[in-house]
Image: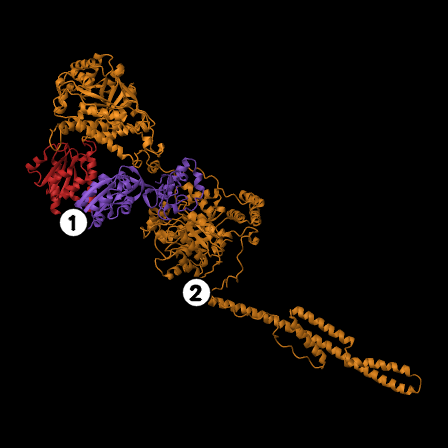
Amino acid sequence: MIIAERKSMNEILDMLDGVKKLLVLGCRGCVAVCSAGGDKEVEIMASAIRLGKKLAGEPIKIEATTYIRQCDPEYIEPLKKEGKKYDAVLSMACGVGVNFIADLCPGVKVLPGVNTTFYGANLSSGEWKEMCAGCGSCVLHLTGGLCPVARCAKRLSNGPCGGSQGGRCEIHPDTPCVWHFIHERLQEQGEADRLKEIMPIRDWSPAGDAGPRRRVREDLLP
Amino acid sequence: MARKKSKKRASAGIVGFCCNYTVSVEPEMLKERGLVPEDVAFKRLPCTGRLEVPAILDAFTEGAEAVFVAGCQIDECHNLSGSKRAAKRVQYARKILEELGLQPERLEMVFVPRGESEPIVEAARELKMRLSTMEGRS
Amino acid sequence: MIANSNLENILTSGRFAVTGELGPPKSGDPEVVRKKVRILKGHVDAVNITDCQTAIVRMSSLTAGLLALSEGVEPVMQMTCRDRNRIGIQAEILGASALGIKNLLCLTGDHQKFGNHPQARGVFDMDSIQLLSMMKGMRDDRKFQCGEEIKSHEPRLFLGCAANPFADPFEFRAVRLGKKVDAGANFVQTQIIYNVEKFKKFMEMVCDLGIHEKCYILAGVTPPKSLGMARYMKKFVPGLDVTDEVIQRLEDAADKKEEGINICVDIINQVKEIPGVAGVHIMAIEWEEAVPEIVSRAKLGPRPEPTGIEPVLMDRAAVETAVEKAKEAAERELQVQIDTAKKEADASRKLVLKEKERLSAEMEQIKKELEEAKRMASQKEAEVKKLASELQTAKSQPKEMVASQPAAQAAAIAAPAGAALTPREQAVLNSLHMGLDALKKALGLSDEQYEALRRFLEAEFMLFAGEEPQAVPAAPPSEPAPAPQPEPEPTVATREPVAEAPPPPPEPEAPAELAGLPPVPEGLTAEEWQRKWVIRLVARGNLQMLKGDFQGAIETFKQALAIEPDNEKAKRGLSQAESGKAPEMAMPEPEAAPVETPAAEEKIEVKPAEEEARPEPVVEEKAAPEPEVVKKKEPAAEVKSAPAPKAAPAAEGPEAFELPKETVPLIERAGSISEELYKEPASGRIYEVTIGEGEKAITVGGNDTLPFHLFEGDMPNPPKVAYEVLDSAPEEWPEPLAQYYSDCFEDPVKWAQKCVNEFGAESICVSLVSTDPNGMNRPSDEAAKIAQKVVEAVDVPIILWGCGNAEKDTETLREVTSLIGNKKVCLSPLTDANYRTLGATAMAFQLPVVAATPIDVNLAKQLNILLENLGLPLDHILMDPSIGAVGYGLEYTYSVMERITLAALTQQDEKLAVPFICNLGREVWKAKECRLPSDDILGDQERRGVMMEAITASSLLLAGGALMVMRHPKAVALTESLIKAMV
């Protein structure tokens, strides 16, 4: 899922300068699952802004609600009207939600309440880790299911660099060297020879380097 | 719910959220006996595990200068992990306070052995002390 | 020859190469570079110019490299993938090539995190191996990375790569180097070596793979400048293995720098002996002065005069020097040409003089002969005259005819003296011409020159003046020596003015040097040198084969065999070369080295977290919310209208609620979404447990799907509800609940019958609350008798629920079973404190039991296992996970039940695959919310209680509850109608 992280309160209060009536708008999609922008986090954000504004001596009226998703037009529909009742809408959804509201709801000032960080998995309660970079051309079948694009600091294609030590990446002792584990995994699977092949230079255009990406499935179009 | 209740009790200097199981003595009695300062307002919770971050923040918004949360000893919680959760939420609330420019020392979690009230008295006094040494509200 | 760089020349000629390293400055000061280069000059064959090493911004490798070049030291340019994409890299390389760069070290580059701009975006469009491929493609295939042709001046670069023998996984390191060589690396520079033993192991693997024969490996060394530096490298530089011995040596040394150099020299001497090592790369960054000392102590100096250095760009001073040099060289050459011309002119002048002498001598002779002829002619004349006079005298005599003859003779003799030449003269002229021809050939005269000379001599000859011939002009303009050419303009573009002068370096193919074994270098035994030399020959042969020079390869291999006839590699190479086949590039299997398998704990850490199959929030269909809303609303509406709490008399039975059933199956609602996408069929099945016997027996469990997920599995037995009957009058039941039973509070039998007959109870749970030692503490035998009566009075299945005191429950329940005989009641609760005794009782009578545990998956599982070990089959067990009412811990219960259900259904956790019994009535009705009277805020008390109980029940149903123990008939009715609607 998409992982996001609450913006710092200083940043939020800065962007709310002059806002007197605010809607904090959560999303029950990914950000709810990763505890960044669901109902609970919306409550916390609203309370925190209230406190922050009070400390600053600025009055503010805050309402809070959470949509099922902010990345489908039908869920956003009510905001087209509702949103205009507020000086600003602080979206707790990922960047997709903020953009979508900006696209679909003219006249509504939408602000981001979270930083959208990565595509990740939930390691344990409260911990998420990047697992995919959305590069648009998956090579996981060649790498034992472990992604060198998302999980190698240099996005290497041909094995661990000289900084791999004891299964750790040189950039941080907490970061595993994914190539070390690709090597290990392929050895377990009896496919270590695969790493002898030179993986050719990648085409990054599906990764977004060729411009904003779009996907169409003709059979589903209205 | 906690937020609605606390609105009635605005203007308190210190707010203490207390676990129902832990605090066997009516906290008000502590006040009557003069063990805790007058401006401490107690709020009983069925379990501190029920205490959410917004309730803590709202206590400040409604005028509290400091807040403490009194829960069971961490491994003796009536609801097993209630006070553990509370401690983590307190930690998170402290982070938000700091981001908002409030000293995190204004918020404290205390663990109270069942049936004792001493730690609560201590916490209330300690916070009172801290407040007196702090400059302004931020 | 690939790039004709000095480094390439040194390596291909089989000499041990020495390269240095130079870090460009963090400024635009060229003098810093020049100063360092001057220190290294003459001590290294080439110098690596780092490309912003450790990601710190410095003068670029190309520009610093050009400065080195202008100082006459060959640079090895470095290129990392960190800062440029494929467009930038290729552009830079074209420029580098244009400006005379010939060596390129291809690196991925240190991560920007380590540098002074950690916030920079790392490019990493490709990695070092792909960079090598791209460079090789540009050079050998004359193609840009995109495939477009490079029409001319493709960059010809000698390509290098780095290798770190000390990084992990160790066994992959040689393989990775092999990939780099396959991708295009011609030479390799290794990470700094301190651990020579490990490096040796690495080189063994490299040699096993034959990589050393396809490239030149330079061992990286660095003199530790101080103890602090050595410690820092040991501790903080990943992939650098500084041995304790090195640290110790530095610790013990008085002069750390001196010892640092000694350590470096020792390491060089050791690595030099390792097969496959073709040179050393000395990295003494910011300590360049150490390099000359190291090179000389390691007996690697002086380095051969560099070749192939062609600076294209130079600074003004260098340009002037170069111009001066070029001028001098041109003048020198001119002088040589002039001298030669002069000599040749002198020689030809002498020759001409000689010939002239010869000719004049001959003319003298001819003159003499002519004199003689003249004299003879005059004599003849006299004779003629004499004859004429005789004729005159004889006129008178008739001898006239005779007299005319001598006259004709005289006329014939006289004629040549005037016009024609005599045959002799003709012969003289002919010989003169022949002499001239020879002269022309000898001197290479042009036709005009020859003609001129000929005419001159003929004229002289014809003039016949008898004077001495005039002196030949000193240097005729047509002298054979080529005219001095116009002075060559010494421009910047002059190529190789000096390089031409010294004899070319011996080519690798030059047989002269290869014929035998070159003299043994110092520090090597003859035997070692021979081995080393053979290795180099073999490597060279392989290289030649790769280049397609099979003839050369055969020669080389033969030489190798001449020195060491048993060398397998040479033999193989020879046969390959003779068959015209390049050596196979495929590398042999690396040994499955058991070295350094990472600790098990590390393994665990990166395994993707897959333990928990989390419910996917994303599959939620857009159409779903609508029908759901409708469903939820309806029961609420019914409640509102149906029970009129105040009017409800005790006798009135619960209304039957009818909830609309979902008529459109999911498969239709899902529309085009394929079933696989939302169906996740379970792999397990919950055991079926039957309570009671005969027609009225109830069976719960048996489902192989999550509760009510009928679209993906089967739920053969809908959940059931049991009415709770207390064995003594309850004291604290709130009125809205009590009103239904108050008429039979004192008589459990009547109570149970009422439930069955009036409310249609399908089963009864008799709570033996009276036995509680902390309460009424009714003796077990008394309680047992009451229970017995109830059991016998109704025909629906009975659950006997103890007071919760383990000892007392054992006593009471055993007592009951002994009274009721074979009647199939269900015994509960069995806890870890009394499961043995009660379990044995249950086994004896084949009764189902309830295993009760305090809200914990593991405890629940453990108790089931204990019971099963005791001999009680799992299909006789119901689980009581400990129930919390809504608002009183329901979420804990829900979560535990959900986890147990998921474990049972999707993780084949058979020990958890037993149905739940949820004794919830007692939990709900003790809640404060059920006791507070009706008021405006909280609303009607009964409805509140009913809703509390029904909502608790419905939540537990969704969590997997199979049997609900409840109290309020309306709540039961609501729950049953919900079940009915959903299955």
Nearest the viewer among C143 and C320 is C143
List x then y, in percent, for residue C586: 49, 42
Dot 1, how many residues are within 10 Å of its Cα: few (below 14), some (14-19), or many (20+)? Answer: few
Question: Residue type at mark 2?
Answer: Ala
Chain with purple colouring: A
List x then y, in percent, for residue C707: 28, 27
Between the residue at mark 2 and the residue at mark 1, the CA separation in whole angstroms equals: 68 Å
Question: Quarter holding the C terminus of chain A?
Answer: top left
**Drawn colour of chain B?**
red
Question: Residue type at mark 1?
Answer: Ala
Image mark for residue C523: none
Nearest the viewer among A15 and C194 is A15
Q: Which residue bears the numbered disc 1?
A: A56
- The subunit letter for the residue under badge 1 reads A
Chain with orange colouring: C
Residue C444 placement, left or right of C951: right
Dot 2, how many residues are within 10 Å of its Cα: few (below 14), some (14-19), or many (20+)? Answer: few
